[in-house]
Image: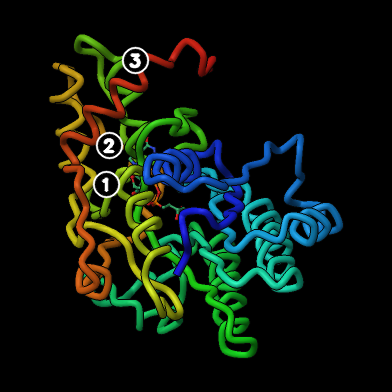
Amino acid sequence: MLKKTDKIFLAGHRGLVGSAIHKRLLDEGYQDVVVKTRQELDLMNQADVYGFLASEKPQAVILAAAKVGGINANNTYPADFIGQNLIIESNLIWGAHLADVPHFQFLGSSCIYPRETPQPIPEEALLSGKPEPTNAPYAIAKIAGLYLCDSIRRQFGRNYYTVMPPNVFGDRDNYDLKTSHVLPALIRKFHEALPNSDVICWGSGNPRREFLHSDDVAGACVFLLQQDGVEGHINVGTGASVSIRELAETIQRIVGHQGSILWDTSMPDGFPEKTMDVTRLFGMGWRPQISLESGIRSAYDWFLANREQLALR
Ligand code: GFB
């Protein structure tokens, strides 16, 4: 188990999940959290990463840096999603092993599970079927990182494991309508359509998604740092999902939009459902603290406070 004085390198501290983990680590009294901007350390450069880890010799690495995006981004830039993530993962995970780093927490994503799988999805469902085509390259990259962590655990006995969050939202989210995930996209679309212009959502509205606020993802990650024997990969979530239509109507109500919601079925639905079985994590004593409604209200407040700086096109 980690002590609060142990050195932790957090990769991706400016991102949606990484910034929440950074805040949580400091709030919980971790005294030696090392972070580097992209300019200070290029995670795509193997020699720089290996050299950094060998000289810093942290007790733990948390990898929250990745090339991420929503369904349209994944569908448009498949090579970027698999190529950049494979390079970042192998640099950090293998570099940590070479530097004798004892603990490694790798952030995965629920899209690694097969498109057709029982819901809610247990950890055992991994590789039991074909991935969802819209994000298969990204999923394969994340599965590779998961297997690299677990193989280092099996062969060298290091405490390397993967945390599997669902669709995440929160402060410092991506509000670019072409590359973002659905929740921030709909916050922006309904806000910019105030008071009653039509809002066009993608797909049928029927798919179901599980949403977890980034502060809860951070809470689970820091909780797991304090647990022994987290082997393989562990689902993190609420265990509940909503349809995209329900999500759109909830965001519409919170934003105060009065117009029509239209559905562009020329855009892909992606997974029919992604709801995770969180029995294992709940059995360890963790629970999410932020409801979807209060999380959306908080995300909308952040969007209103920051949208000028976001220079949204
Ligand atoms: O969040 P999202 O982009 O990604 O889309 P996925 C979720 C659902 O919302 C899809 C619908 O069915 C979309 O068609 N949707 C409706 C919209 N309106 C919109 C909109 O305006 N913008 C967006 N983005 N979606 C991602 C993976 O899948 O899940 C990533 O591609 C990652 O790799 C992420 O794993 C967690 O949930 O479908």
Badge number at residue 193: none
Which mark is in front, 2 or 3? 3
Q: Is residue 102 above or below residue 37?
A: below
Q: Residue at x 21, y 27 (%)?
A: 297
The reply to whether the C-beta atoms of the residues labelled 1 and 2 are less than 8 Å apart is yes
Mark earlier in primary sequence (1, 2): 1
Q: Which residue is mark 1?
A: 204
Answer yes or no: disc 2 within 8 Å of ligand 1.
yes
Is 129 on the left-hand or right-hand side of 244?
Answer: right
Instruction: Calculate the distance from the C-alpha at mark 2 to the C-alpha at mark 3.
Output: 25 Å
Q: Is residue 76 visible?
A: no
Helix, strand or loop status at disc 2? strand
Q: Position of residue 52 (x, y in %)?
A: 78, 53
Amino acid type, label 3:
Leu
Q: Name the residue carrying label 2.
A: 263
Q: Amino acid at mark 2?
A: Trp
- Queried on whether the Cβ of the residue with tag 1 lies below 8 angstroms from ligand 1, the answer reads yes
Q: Residue at x 20, y 9 (%)?
A: 195
State the CA–CA distance, disc 1 to disc 2: 6 Å
Foreground mark, 1 or 3, reads 3
| Measured Cα–Cα span from mark 1 to mark 3 | 28 Å
Q: Which label's residue is closer to the chain start, 2 or 3?
A: 2
Inspect the image, locate mark 1, and give the three-letter code of the amino acid beneath it.
Ser
Q: In front: 16, or 102?
A: 102
From the image, which quarter does the N terminus lie in?
Answer: bottom left
Q: Residue furthest right?
A: 47
Q: Residues within 10 Å of mark 2 (few under 14, many from 20)?
A: some
Secondary structure of residue under mark 3: helix
Whole-percent x, y for residue 280 in the image: 26, 75
Residue of label 3: 304
